[in-house]
Amino acid sequence: MSVATIPVTTREIQLASRPAGRPVPENFRLAESLLPELQDGQVMVRNLFMSVDPYMRGRMNDVKSYSAPFALDKALDGGAVGEVIASRSERHQEGDVVVHALGWREYAVVDAAAATPARTDLAPASAFLGALGMTGLTAYAGLLKVAEFKAGDAVFVSGAAGAVGSLVGQIAKAMGASRVIGSAGTPAKVARLLELGFDAAFDYHDGPVLEQLQKAAGSAGIDVYFDNVGGEHLEAALATLNVGGRVAMCGAIAQYNSTEPTPAPHNLMLAIGKQLTLRGFLVGGQRQHSAEFAERMAGWLADGTVRYDETIVDGLENAPQAFMDLLDGANTGKMLVRLWRLSGS
């Protein structure tokens, strides 16, 4: 792209107000802002895809947490993959595809050191926000490092048709799980889990989670629970886990829009007698496993051991609705917003 065609403004999605409970369209604003002038050590990126993720709901609240809250009347941020259209860095050249953290806008000026190359010769650009990105690392490290999965374990995954959960189940099968069980929110998602190699799956709307989980697990019980949901699912898992069972606490999407305090599992005391390990984690604390993960996942994708789904919404203006739909479980696999297509494609 020539200097004459480099944009000076970008469209972006700003946080117009903080949600009370479930986010609504009025909490967001489509705006245009000036791009900062490109400095030494920076690149300008035309974003191809941006990610919407459940954790972003917590950042919309003005409360102290592990990640700073979004600022009112400013652009939101999050994972994005895009094409470098101008560079003042030796790290990245024009035409390179990179992953960075300034999503929710069409163009971004990014410190080159904060942009990671996306090997589009290995997989499409969008995969680097999903199976080959932080989503994949979350699934891999959460199962193998946090929950300390070992061959022969029986695994239960909640939110199993989502971006992380669907990968967790497939990784567990690839690593020798004796049985993998998933829960999801529609019959179509249940069917998809079975296609992906889950041994059993159920729709949590069909009855109490505990009854359905124990039917799927049988007398063998479960050894590992990968928790994306919290609430009733966590309580059911505690009742079904074997002695020495492990829980990787990744998310609690059932509670993200709650306006009242949510009760802890009523059977938490089971963790004592069963000698359970419940361990919360953030993917940021698992980056030391990135190289190991990338090598294994690239191999699994190449030979078809692991497959991934994407739900793609077109247009920056539709990003808020994509995010709200994500919280309602409208996605299968990774929810992405497509902003531009790669040059030449």
Image: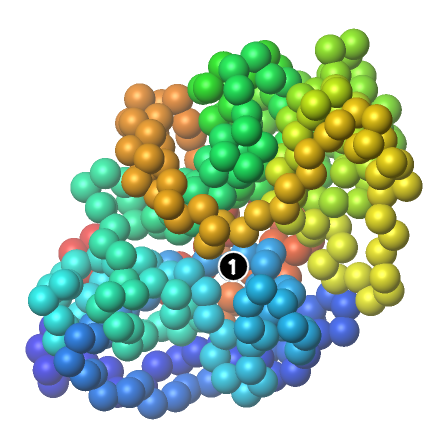
**Could you tell whether 225 is left or right of 52 in the image?**
right
| Label 1 neighbour load within 10 Å: few <14, some 14-19, many 20+ | many
Residue 35: x %, y % from top left: 30, 86
Q: Is residue 89 visible?
A: yes
Above or below for 78 versus 175: below
**What is the tally of numbered marks visible in this picture?**
1
Which quarter of the picture shows residue 260?
bottom right
Q: Is residue 320 visible?
A: no
Residue 95: x %, y % from top left: 14, 61
Which quadrant, please, contains the N terminus? Answer: bottom left
Viewer-nearest residue: 168 or 1: 168
* Residue at position x 47%, y 38% in the image: 141
Viewer-nearest residue: 9 or 213: 213
Instruction: Identify the image's colour scheme: rainbow, by chain, secondary structure or one colour.
Output: rainbow
The residue at the far top in this view is 219
Label 1 residue SS? loop
Q: Amino acid at mark 1?
A: Val
* Residue at position x 42%, y 30% in the image: 307
Above or below for 75 versus 128: below
Viewer-nearest residue: 20 or 145: 145
Residue 15: x %, y % from top left: 57, 79
The residue at the far right in this view is 266
* Residue at position x 69%, y 25% in the image: 245
Which quarter of the picture shows residue 314?
bottom left
Residue 135: x %, y % from top left: 46, 46
**Could you tell whether 227 is left or right of 107 in the image?**
right
* Residue at position x 22%, y 68% in the image: 112
- According to the picture, the residue beneath numbered tag 1 turns out to be 52
Viewer-nearest residue: 289 or 254: 289
Above or below for 105 versus 269: below
